[in-house]
Image: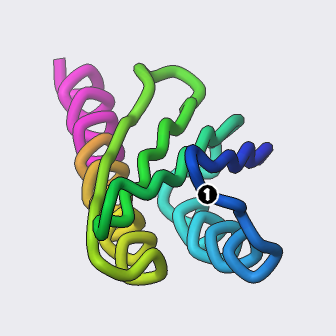
């Protein structure tokens, strides 16, 4: 999995990079076909925003946004959203495969 992290009006520090990479690595246990992740961190006045786009093989891109007063809390919110979306995607794929086998 290739992770691209960029900052908009923000210097992305090494601890932030490692925290994001650590959190995104946990998403691979649901779907091992994540090829590329684009993460954009942004500061807008007092709000810390983060957006991520996951490129999953055999599926459309999965996009999630989160904002919070603390960047690390925003990263946690983002990974929770991505986790839910990946689980939903995985369940949908399994139900399609099981439906095709039953026919």
Give the residue at x 23% y 37%: 92
Above or below for 89 versus 100: below
> Which residues are drawn in magenta?
90-103
Q: Which residue is mark 1?
A: 10
Q: Answer with the quarter of the image where residue 73 lies.
A: bottom left
Quadrant, the C terminus: top left
Q: Secondary structure at mark 1?
A: loop
Q: Is residue 19 left or right of residue 50?
A: right
Give the residue at x 35% y 54%: 44
Q: Is residue 37 magenta?
A: no
Pinpoint residue 2: horizontal percent, then vertical percent: 79, 44
Q: How many marks?
A: 1
Pinpoint residue 39: horizontal percent, then vertical percent: 58, 46
Nearer-the-camera pick, 55 or 64 = 64
Nearer-the-camera pick, 10 or 103 = 10
Q: Is residue 100 magenta?
A: yes
Prevailing secondary structure class for the magenta stretch in the rendered image: helix
Above or below for 32 versus 21: above
Nearer-the-camera pick, 20 or 59 = 20
Pinpoint residue 67: horizontal percent, then vertical percent: 28, 62
Give the residue at x 76% y 72%: 13
Above or below for 3 versus 17: above
Q: Residues within 10 Å of mark 1 (few under 14, many from 20)?
A: few
Pinpoint residue 90: horizontal percent, then vertical percent: 35, 46
Q: Is residue 62 left or right of residue 52?
A: left
Nearer-the-camera pick, 80 or 40 = 40
Give the residue at x 74% y 48%: 3
């Amino acid at each position: 999995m290739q992770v691209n992290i960029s900052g908009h009006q923000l210097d992305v520090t090494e601890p932030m990079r490692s925290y994001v990479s650590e959190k995104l690595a946990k998403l691979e246990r649901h779907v091992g076909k994540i090829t590329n992740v684009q993460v954009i961190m942004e500061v807008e006045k007092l709000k810390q925003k983060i957006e991520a786009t996951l490129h999953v093989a055999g599926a459309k891109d999965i996009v999630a946004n989160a904002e919070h007063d603390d960047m690390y809390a925003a990263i946690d919110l983002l990974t929770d959203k991505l986790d839910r979306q990946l689980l939903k995607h995985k369940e949908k794929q399994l139900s399609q495969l099981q439906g095709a086998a039953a026919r």
